[in-house]
Amino acid sequence: MKNIRNFCIIAHIDHGKSTLADRLLQTTGTVSDRDLQEQTLDDMDIERERGITIKSHAIQMRHEHEGEHYILNLIDTPGHVDFSYEVSRSIAACEGALLIVDATQGIQAQTISNLYLALEHDLEIIPVLNKMDLASAMPEEVSDQIVDLIGCEYEDIIPASGKSGLGVDQILQAILERVPAPEGDPDGPLQAMIFDSVFNSYRGILAYVRIFNGTLNKGDLVKFINTGKEYDADEIGVLKLDLEPHSQLSAGDVGYIISGIKQAREVKVGDTVTHKNNPGAAIKGFEDVKPMVFAGIYPVDTDEYEDLRDAIEKLQLNDASLTFEPETSAALGFGFRCGFLGMLHMEIVQERLEREFDISVITTVPNVSYIAHTKSEEVLKVTNPSEFPDPAKLDFVEEPFISAQIITKSDYIGQVMNLCIEKRGILQNQNYLTTDRVEIIFHIPLAEIVFDFYDRLKTVSRGYASFDYHPIDYQRSNLVKLDIMLNGDQVDALSALIHRDNAYYLGKKICSKLRELIPRQQFEIAIQAAIGAKIIARETVKAMRKDVTAKCYGGDITRKRKLLEKQKKGKKRMRQVGNVEVPQAAFMAVLKLD
């Protein structure tokens, strides 16, 4: 055990974690030059296309130093705020962390929040200054920021470059010297924590585990404490680039268990695996994740409902921060109300459903969860606008607020503050980290940052501002339910809960957008936005009409009028029985309204 090191890589998005992981794999000879590619550990197409890490990836490296053989278990983690749950799970399986800071950009908001996560778990932090080969690197300035943040010595910071391989040997040496070996009793009762899992259509579910105490042998009868289920460990092993079967794993090891589990709901991330005959106690895993953004996901073809359920269950194995429950909609039929950690997370889930499971889905307008207090003193949690109580019975509504930490250059303070105030933010604190870098803390309603806040923040700060947030509490707000109606019928999938001040503006915008996107029918379609019984905006899609008077050449005007009256009656009757199809493009366009 003294020669095992478990560590993860944490950083802000785009600071070079995956590239540095590539160099570590190359230097230790874990991956041959032939198999090496950009972002070797990122095995999803989406990750490569977007150049971001979405999933944590564990891999074992072997390294020889001064005649001794060491086993290094590395976990590469995502940097985006939407995937912070992945980071917290990886940190729970490690004893040390490489904190990577971009020498051209300095410390950013996500760096700080990931660092606090690591410090809460008492991890040994090794600071690395990456991208030192770039002409725009500012090593002295950024080193000062790291020393202020962590309180380490200047000589503890390792200058490195993921592209050129500079400093990789020093990083490996620092891991061996500074990261403590795992502690645990190989002879005690088995305690192994599941930190990730993945579905394989041939083998069933693979559970990735970190063993804290005890020893696991191939073929042992194991028990999952949380679900109480028992299985045989058909195959166990360690995670190389491919799975490498072993006959035994003991305390301190990171590996996988295959036990032929077919049901996705029988494996829960954070659960403890132990022996059936000599059970150990459950390890304190991670807290259950709290979704931030809710949206309905419906199959385009209603026959695919069961396939969609299977697909979401399998996806949840691999992405434990996704939550879902069944719901129905008058406009879209049967589907699921899913909880996501943010808009990027929602976009990725939708894309993975389409790519990995070949299911086309419609996503409704995202919203957050509210607490509604009725006059009869009932307290309701509302995650779907259709559950919102009648305005006549409503006393007041509370909405979730977050504490947003924004780090930006001092030149852009004005624009960033204007943006936050426009989003109903309340300034809490402002302090200068250095002469030209400011940290601003705002309390902002979560609903306001869900859509386009991050994009606009990058725009007003020319890409310099970085942003991180955590939920604080619920506060009273003047919210109303905005309904969209087509010919008097409510389209529940387009309803939204918004602040009263923005209701008219948004209602007008949705109506005019729908007018462009809904195809013309034989009858007139009225598109209306309403709050309760009050209509606040209206647009009309004009009817296509046949020229019924074309055959009247000359003759008395009453002949034409008779034909037009007959047509008018037909249109009126058609309007009563005709129903309006809302195309998928209309749902998507409403999401993209700024």
Image: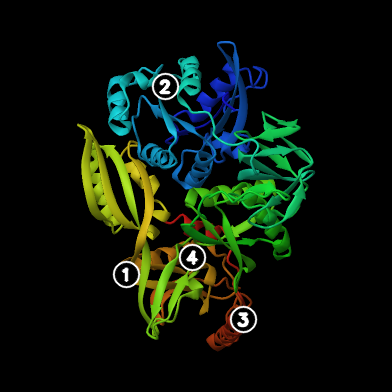
Q: Which residue is mark 4?
A: 515
Q: Which amino acid, mark 4? A: Arg
Q: CA distance from mark 2 to mark 3?
A: 67 Å
Q: Which amino acid, mark 2? A: Lys
Residue 485 position, x and y percent, is: 49, 75
Q: Which residue is mark 2?
A: 131
Q: Indicate which disc, 4 or 3, sits on the residue closer to the N terminus.
A: 4
Residue 583 position, x and y percent, is: 59, 62
Foreground mark, 4 or 3, reads 4
Q: Which residue is mark 1?
A: 476
Q: Is residue 90 left or right of residue 277?
A: left
Q: CA distance from mark 1 to mark 2?
A: 46 Å
Q: Which amino acid, mark 3? A: Met
Foreground mark, 1 or 4, reads 1
Say whether marks 2 and 3 touch (CB < 8 Å): no
The numbered dot on residue 574 is 3
- Within 10 angstroms of label 1, few (less than 14), some, or many (20 or more) residues? some
Q: Indicate which disc, 1 or 3, sits on the residue closer to the N terminus.
A: 1
- SS for tag 2? loop
Q: Is residue 208 left or right of residue 89?
A: right
- Within 10 angstroms of label 3, few (less than 14), some, or many (20 or more) residues? some
Q: Residue at x 65, y 21 (%)?
A: 31
Q: Indicate which disc, 4 or 2, sits on the residue closer to the N terminus.
A: 2
- SS for tag 4? helix
**In the image, is residue 304 above or below residue 121?**
below
Report if residue 353 is visible in the image: no
